[in-house]
Amino acid sequence: MTFASFNLHPRIASGVQALGYEQPTPIQLQAIPPVLEGRDVMGLAQTGTGKTAAFVLPILQRLMEGPRGRIRALILAPTRELAEQIHDHIGGLGQHTRSRSVTLYGGVSQRPQVEKLRAGVEIAVACPGRLLDLIGQREIDLSHVEILVLDEADRMMDMGFLPDIRRILKHVPVKRQTLLFSATMPDDIRQLAHDILRAPVTVQIGQTAPAATVAHALYPVAGHLKTALLLELLQGTDTESVLVFTRTKHRAKRLADQLKKAGYRTASLQGNLSQNRRMEAMDMFRDGSVQILVATDIAARGIDVSSISHVINYDMPDTAEAYTHRIGRTGRAAKTGDAFTFVTEEDADMVRAIERLLGAKLERRTLPGFDYRAPEPERSAGGLSRPPRGSRPPAAREPQRVTTPTPAPAPAAASDAWSAFRRRSRRRPGGVRPTMGRR
C-alpha cells in the first residue's frame, strides 16, 4: 500500500513525494484512515514509528478547506525539541499548501511567537507552560480549534503537565476531534484518555518495547570506571552517530567536555542551554558535524535523527519505560542499531524490570583488556569520575573504524564486578528502585 491510497489532496501528496515518503508505516496505515474520518484516536506506538506524519497529514487535509488565519489545530508536546520537530514535519509535508504553523514554548522571547499569532496561523504546536502564559495574556484564541493532538502524552505526565493540560482543555471547544499518542499506557494516561476521547479508535503497534532492529547489551562496571569504559568502548567500536544518556544536566555537560578533550566531536543537550544553543547542537548532530551527543532524558525528547547507530546509557534510566524511550532513538526506519547500558550493582532491580518489559534476558558483556579493578580516582567537580590513571584516552583524532566488541568470557580483572552484580541480582525482588527526583 502507498500514500496514494489515502486520497490526500494533490498539494499534500506533492509534499509527501518531496520528502521521499514511499510506503506508510504501520502506525500511519492504521491511524490515518480513522483520523481522516473525523474519529478520535488513541495511538500506542514506540518512538520512531512515524506517528508524527500519522496526525500531521490528516490535519493538513482538513485545513485544505475552511477559513484561514485562525487556529484550527492545536498540538501539545512536552519539549521544545519535539515541538520544533513537529513544526518541521508540518512545513515539509505542507510545503505546497497555504497552511501556516507556529511553535510556542518557553526559554525564548515570546514576542516573535505573538507576532506570528497576530499575523494569523492555522496550526499551533505548543508546550503547555508557554501556551498557558499566552492564554492568560489573551494573546491566543483557541475557540476555533477543531483538532486537538496530545503527542508523547506519557512524557507530559512524567514532567508533571497533567494539571496544565486540564487547564488548557477548558479553553478549547468541547466539540472537537481529539488524538492522543503515547508510547506507554500508565494509569494516568488511561484516565485522561477516558476523560477526553469520545468512542476512540485504538491503534497499537507492537509492544511498548524498543524496535526489533535494536541489539541490547549490558556492561556491568563500577561507577567510578564509567568514563574510562566509555572511552575504551568508543575507541574500539565502529560508530556513526552516538547518543549518550546521563541522569543529570551537570553530568551531561561534564562528560561532553571530557569527550571533547579526548578528541571526539561532541556536544551536550541539557536544560542549562538556551534554546538557540540546543537547536544548534541538534542541527550539528543531524548533519554529522557532531558525532556524539550527550543528553538528559528531558532534553533529548523529540530527537529525530534516523542515522543514530548507537545509544549508550552512561547512567541507568529511572524507569523501564524510560529505557524504551532512550533506546527508541536508534534502530529507526528499519535500520539496525546498538544499545549499550552501563550498570552498577545498585541497578540490578532496574535491569530485572527492563527484562520483564522486554520479555527477554539482556546480554551481559565485558570489554577484553579493560582494567575493572582500577581504584577510584579523585572526584572532579560535579561528582563525575576522571579516567583512572593508566587508562589512556584515544588521541585527538577520529575514532577507529573497527567492529563492535564481541561478547567474551569475563576476564579475571572483571570478576569482582560480575560477582557483585550477580549477588545483587539474586536478592529477593522488591520492585524497582525509587524514581530519582527531577533535575
Image: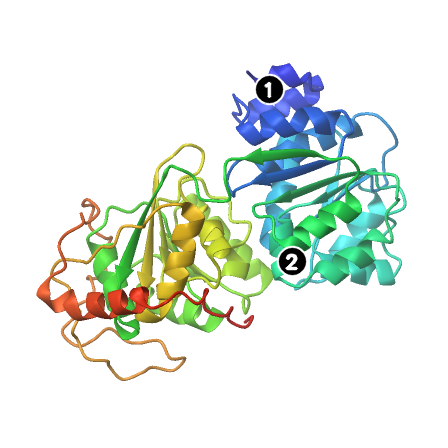
Q: Which mark is residue 157?
A: 2
**Residue 356 in sight:** yes
Residue at 49% in and 56% down: 322
Mark on residue 3?
A: 1
Q: Earlier in the sequence, mark 2 or mark 1?
A: 1
Instruction: Report the label total.
Output: 2
Residue 332 lies left or right of residue 166; in this view the side is left
Decide if residue 102 is on the left or right side of residue 402: right
| Left or right for 254, reference 2 | left
Callout 2 secondary element: helix
Q: Secondary structure at mark 1?
A: helix
Q: 125 or 413, which lies in front?
A: 413
Counting from the top left corner in percent of width and height, residue 364 is at 25, 54
- Mark 2: give few (<14), some (14-19) or many (20+) Cα within 10 Å: some
Q: Taking 224 as reference, is 164 above or below it?
A: above
* Residue 329, above or below 382: above
Q: CA distance from mark 2 to mark 1?
A: 33 Å
The image quadrant where one finds the C terminus is bottom right
**Frontmost residue, 359 versus 260:** 359
Callout 1, which amino acid? Phe
Give the label, 2 or 1, closer to the camera.
Answer: 2
Instruction: Name the kind of residue labelled 2 in the image.
Output: Met
Point out residue 208 in the picture as x, y percentages from the top left corner.
51, 44
* The furthest residue to the bottom: 378
The front one of 310 and 290 is 310
Q: Residue at x 64, y 42 (%)?
A: 181
Q: Residue at x 75, y 33 (%)?
A: 99
Question: Would you identify the image quadrant in which residue 137 lies?
Answer: bottom right
Position of residue 289 in the picture relative to residue 50 (left or right)? left
The answer, for residue 344, to whether it is visible in the render is no
Q: Which mark is residue 53?
A: none
Q: Position of residue 218 (x, y in %)?
A: 29, 56
